[in-house]
Every structure is written in structure tokens, then in C-alpha cells.
Image (cartoon, rainbow, N blue to C red):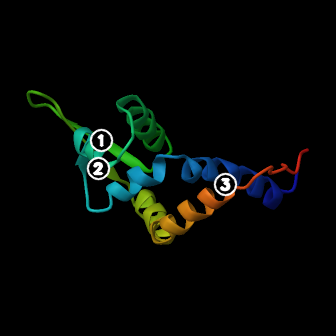
Amino acid sequence: MDTANGDACRTRVVLEIVGDKWSLLVVRNLRDGPRRFGELKKAIDGISQRMLTVTLRSLERDGILTRTVRNVMPPHVSYELTPMGVTLREAAAPLLEWSIAHLSQIDDARADYDARPDYDSPAD
């Protein structure tokens, strides 16, 4: 197998990280430094406790963030971007800004699309 082609195919792994519904929002919310689980949960509208846990574990596994536990009562757990996570945040920032800037246009386009009578899908 061609190494360059193999590497290009493996980029799907990275796209799974950044294409995940919650990962970039977690990364964005860690932009100003370490945060605790509860802080992230409050900051990310609509994420469930379970999905935040799954997302944090996945990002930790991929080397995007670190999890630090301080042995106090109750235990203090915080999450922080790794140097690689910081570069992901920097790369994703324009996409997140674009999303915010175009939310109302996307909402309008969806409403127009959904209001169409008798839409035939390309598969029909």
C-alpha cells in the first residue's frame, strides 16, 4: 500500500474526532484553561452527563486533553488541553466562528427546505 495514500485514508480517524457532535465544543470550552466536569456540563448546552463522560474519555484517549485528579475530599477532577489539543482548538476556531456567524442563515435555509411541497429525494 502506498504510504501517502494509507495516511490519507487514516485521516478518517481525525475526522471522527473533529466531526463528533460534542468534541469540538468540549475543546472550545477548554480554551481558557482547565475546567471541571460540572463546569463543562453547564457550558455545553444539551450534552448529557453520559455523553460528556464518553467525549472526555475519547479525547483523553486520543491525546487531545488530560484528566487530572487531586486527592482532596471530594476528589477534584479537571480537564485541560494538551499541546496537541491546543493546536486542534486553533485549527477548529474558524469553523466554530463560521458556525456561530451563520446559524440564523442555516435556520432559515432549513425552514425553507422543510416547507417545500412534494420534495423528491435524489434516491427516488
Q: Amino acid at mark 3?
A: Ala
Q: Kindly identify which residue carries mark 3.
A: 115
Q: Which residue in the rendered view is the most extreme toward the front?
A: 117
Is residue 64 rendered to the left or right of residue 35? right
Sequence-wise first label, 3 or 1: 1
Q: Nearer the viewer, residue 108 or 68?
A: 108
- For marks 3 and 2, give the CA distance: 33 Å
Sequence-wise first label, 3 or 2: 2
Q: Kindly identify which residue carries mark 2.
A: 43
Q: Amino acid at mark 2?
A: Ala
Q: Kindly identify which residue carries mark 1.
A: 41
10 Å neighbourhood of mark 2: few (<14), some, or many (≥20)? few
In which image quadrant can residue 75 be found? Answer: top left
- For marks 3 and 1, give the CA distance: 34 Å
Q: Give the structural element (helix, strand or loop) at label 3.
A: loop
- For marks 2 and 1, give the CA distance: 6 Å
Residue at image location 48% in from the left, 61% down from the top:
88
Is residue 97 rendered to the left or right of residue 8? left
Q: Give the structural element (helix, strand or loop) at label 1.
A: helix
10 Å neighbourhood of mark 1: few (<14), some, or many (≥20)? some
Residue at image location 33% in from the left, 55% down from the top:
29
Q: Which residue in the rendered view is the most extreme toward the left?
A: 73
Q: Which disc is residue 71 wearing?
A: none
Screen quadrant of the C terminus: top right
Residue at image location 23% in from the left, 39% down from the top:
38
Q: Amino acid at mark 1?
A: Lys
